[in-house]
Amino acid sequence: MPQFATILGPNQYNLSVGNTALLAAVPANPTRMGLTIQNNSANTITFTFGSVTPVSASVGQQIGANAAATVPPSGIGVVGNIGAQLNLIANVAGPSSVTVTEYF
C-alpha cells in the first residue's frame, strides 16, 4: 500500500486593520515562499516586512481599495525578507478588512 505525505495547505489570516501600525499582523515564518495580501476595503493598506514599521504612505508598499498584491520569494522593491513578520496599516481609522494567504 503506498504511503502519502501530508501536504500542508496555505495559511489564511483574516485581519482588521486600522490607522495604527499592526506589527506582526502575520508572524515571521522562515519557510514562507510567498504571500497574497487582499485588501477587502475601500481604503488604502500599506505593508512592510520585519522591523520596518509602516507609519505613512511614504513607508512600505501600498495596496489600493479592493485590490491584491502577491509577493513572490524575491520580494518587491526593496522588500526581500519574505519570511519576516508582516506589518500593516490603513490610511483611515477603519477597520479595514484584509485577507492574507501565506504559501510555503
Image (tube, grey):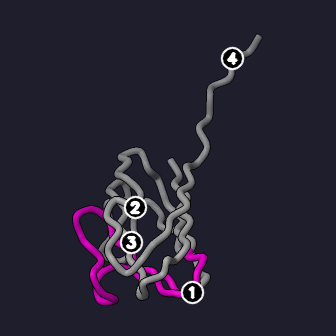
Residue 41 at x, y = what percent? 58, 81
Q: Earlier in the sequence, mark 2 or mark 1?
A: 2
The residue indicated by pointer 4 is: 3
Q: Amino acid at mark 4?
A: Gln
In this view, the mark in front (4 or 1): 1
Label 1 crowding class (10 Å Cα cut-off): few <14, some 14-19, many 20+?
Answer: some
Q: Are marks 1 and 3 in contact (CB under 8 Å)?
A: no
Helix, strand or loop at mark 1: loop
Q: Earlier in the sequence, mark 1 or mark 3?
A: 1
- Say what amino acid the circle numbered 3 marks: Leu
The answer for how far apart the CA atoms under marks 4 and 3 are is 41 Å
Q: Residue furthest right?
A: 1
In the shown orientation, is residue 12 left or right of residue 79?
right
The amino acid on which the numbered mark 2 sits, given as a three-letter code, is Ala
Left or right of residue 94, residue 52 in this image: left
Q: Quadrant of the N terminus?
A: top right
Whether pointer 4 and pointer 1 mark residues with C-beta atoms closer than 8 Å, the reply is no
Q: Would residue 38 appear left or right of 4 to someone viewing this image?
A: left
Q: Residue at x 55, y 49 (%)?
A: 11
- Residue in view at x 25 percent, y 72 percent: 53
The residue wearing badge 2 is 25
Quarter-of-image position of residue 82: bottom left
Residue behind mark 3: 88
- Please report contact status of discs 2 and 3: CB closer than 8 Å, yes or no: yes
| Residue bounds of the magenta highlight | 39-65
Label 1 is placed on what type of residue?
Ala
Residue position marked by numbered label 1 in the rendering: 65
Asked if residue 72 is among those painted magenta in the image, a careful observer would answer no
Q: Is residue 42 magenta?
A: yes
